[in-house]
Amino acid sequence: IRCRLAQYPNLQAPMLRLKAPARACRFYATSKKTYDGGFLQDKDRIFQNLYNDHGSDLKSAQKLGDWYMTKELLHKGPDWIVDQIKKSGLRGRGGAGFPSGLKWSFMPKKPAPDGRPSYVVINADESEPGTCKDREIMRHEPHKLLEGTLLAGFAMRARAAYIYIRGEFYNEAMAVEKAIKEAYDAGLLGDNACGSGYRFDIIVHRGAGAYICGEETALIESLEGKVGKPRLKPPFPANVGLWGCPTTVTNVETVAVSPTILRRGPEWFASFGRKNNSGTKLYCISGHVNKQCTVEETMSIPLRDLIEKHCGGVRGGWDNLLAIIPGGSSVPLIPKSVCDDVLMDFDALMDEGTALGTAAVIVMDKSTDIIKALARISMFYKNESCNQCTPCREGAGMMANIMDRLWKGNAFGPEVDMVKDIADNVEMRSICALGAAAAWPIQGLHRHFRQEMIQRIEDFTDISYNLHKDELFNNSAAFDWRRTPKSFSDVVNAWDAQNSHRKPTPANTNKFVGKYPHIPAYEAERKALDK
């Protein structure tokens, strides 16, 4: 399958392409690694009410251009809409980055002989840590979402659409429900949508907070009233989806931008960003920046420019940057050396061994305990696994267990490379992408911060041994070594003794007290358990 996909690299989803090692990823690299398009101008912003400056009701939305000439767009026909989306180069904004026009074209062109209808499902189950773009659309631009859903449904010849909203998004669900009522009252939805003669309904369904339901087949299972667990594919949802009918699951942002593309033309949308990475994008920037925000910008904007322009820079200055997770917690992190000149698009980040994902940029400065941060992410994926398939169920738990001990300095030396091996075995071997999502953060940490992982163990271990992977895993005695943990006071005293020739250090001000403040409490807990 991978050999056949290599013939069409631009049609591959990032989750398939990320498996290749860094040297192989260069096969897909684009020829140009710079982008001179500048920042997005206000007149080109699709989401004009992202910060609720104008109101989210129907009249306010119409003043901003929503529902304008929608009837005329529908009269151009489904094939025209799909062709325009293909020409625009729009790729899915939910994380996979699959070409949207191509995905829409997979739906049946003719009614099923047995009378089965087709459906569109909007994935508003935004549960990826760090991601908050779809939430802002549902809060402040719900009519843009509804109009896009109508046009997408018409293009795929669907009878109705379901908007599956994350259970915790109460206010967002109420905003969408209110917008749906306004649209029905105005004749924009229903038996004669926009006066076009096309019948189309939109129904809101609220989830219950399970991260796994962000996967399209698990979402369909949940929508049917079953336990939200992914299905084996094939059959794919475009053939057998919701209630056994042809179904396309697509992202909130993906459909919300489609009306503007159809009105302003695919050439306008394709003028932003690099080839195969065109358009505008909502970026969610959080962490150690001076101003966290969600902002619309062009694709292929340099990561450093994005942070300094819209967030006031990294806390303490750019030189204080440690690492950035560029696309939500499930993608590998990149260190400062990569962040200096990387572009924010699918291909540029893929070339660096990470992914754009949901464009949720999580910034970490040098005050961050990077191992603890990744241990927390690993625990999240362990807890959110549906436990259906063995690699994810067992592997996510193993990685979380090792990382939980590692950040406390309580791991064995071989486990530094063992956790990477586990991640490699979990990646792409589960039913859905959650296995890869659990593995990629660990792989990124090991790739860029392996020495810090080794140092964490050596700081709290009397044994000093070579952690070279080939020697360890070819040595049958490697796992028989007995580790002798140091007490926290031993570590502090040893450091003070090594630095006795220097100026005396005030009590409790050496590097270990500030760097590992959790250890005294951890030791007390361990001693209590031993008793």
Image (tube, rainbow, N blue to C red):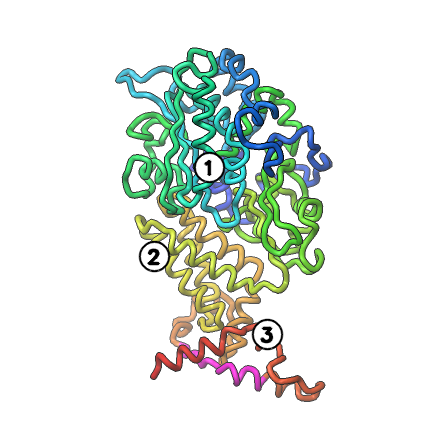
The residue type indicated by label 2 comes to Glu
Q: Is residue 491 magenta?
A: yes
Query: Quick one: label 3 or label 1, which is nearer the N terminus?
Result: 1
Height in image: 361 above or below 376? above
Side (left or right) of 365 relative to 218: right
Rendered residue at 67%/40% (across/down): 301
Between the C-alphas of marks 3 and 2, the distance is 35 Å
Query: Quick one: label 3 or label 2, which is nearer the N terminus?
Result: 2
SS class, disc 3? helix
Q: Is there CB contact under 8 Å for labels 3 and 1?
A: no
Q: Dividing the image into 4 quarters, which one contains the N terminus?
A: top left
Mark 1 packing: few (<14 Cα in 10 Å), some, or many (20+)? few
Which one is closest to the eye, mark 3 or mark 1?
3
Report the residue marked by disc 3. Answer: 514
Range of magenta residues: 481-494
Report the residue marked by disc 2. Answer: 394
Rendered residue at 53%/67% (across/down): 453
The residue type indicated by label 1 comes to Cys
